[in-house]
Structures are given as structure tokens and as C-alpha cells.
Image (cartoon, helix red, strand yellow):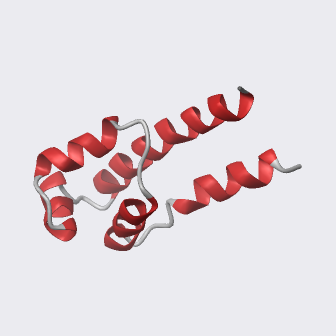
Amino acid sequence: RLFSLLYHIRRVVADLRIHNELLNQQKSVLWLSQQLGCNRTNIYNIFIRESISTDLLLKVSIALKKDFFALYTKLYKESTK
């Protein structure tokens, strides 16, 4: 249960970080949707999903040149101590 809670917290943080990274880079949801080859609604859905596929997270990471996997790596390391 603790792992599940930590995962959910990290997921919310990841969503916020993707959105915040867009803002920090002064890029729009429209820009990211064009980079990923989808529509804006799909990007907004990323922000509210319970989970994100590794393929999609990789695409977002590449588009924004930001390693969003680091959040999950940190969670993995913390959970295996």
C-alpha cells in the first residue's frame, strides 16, 4: 500500500512537472501536441491520467529534452533500500 501511495504521489508530481516544464520552456500545449503528433486534448489528458505509458513518457521527455524518468528511478531506489 505504501508503494501504491508513493507511486500515486510521484505520478501527480510527474504531471505537474510536465506542465511546469512546458511553462518554463515557454512552450504551449499546442506545441507539445504537434511534437507528439496528437491533438491538444490528448495533452490535457496526460495531465489527468492515473498513469502514463513509458512510450509516451519517452516521447514527452525527448520533445522537452527533460528526463522525466528520473522521478521513477528515484522512487525505485527509495523502495529497494
Residue at (40% x, 72% y) in the render: 65
Residue at (25% x, 41% y) in the render: 45
Residue at (60% x, 38% y) in the render: 7
Find residue 81 and report its horizontal and vertical position in percent: 89, 49
16 relative to 5 in the view: left or right: left
Find residue 13 and report its horizontal and vertical position in percent: 50, 40
39 relative to 45 in the view: left or right: left
Q: Which of 36 and 25 is in front in this view?
A: 36
> Up-down: is 73 above or below 65?
above
Residue at (22% x, 49% y) in the render: 43
Find residue 40 and report its horizontal and vertical position in percent: 12, 50
Find residue 14 and report its horizontal and vertical position in percent: 47, 46
Quarter of the image with the N terminus is: top right
Figure disc tally: 0
2 relative to 46 in the view: left or right: right
Question: Outermost residue toward the right?
Answer: 81
> Up-down: is 42 above or below 36?
above
> Up-down: is 45 above or below 66?
above
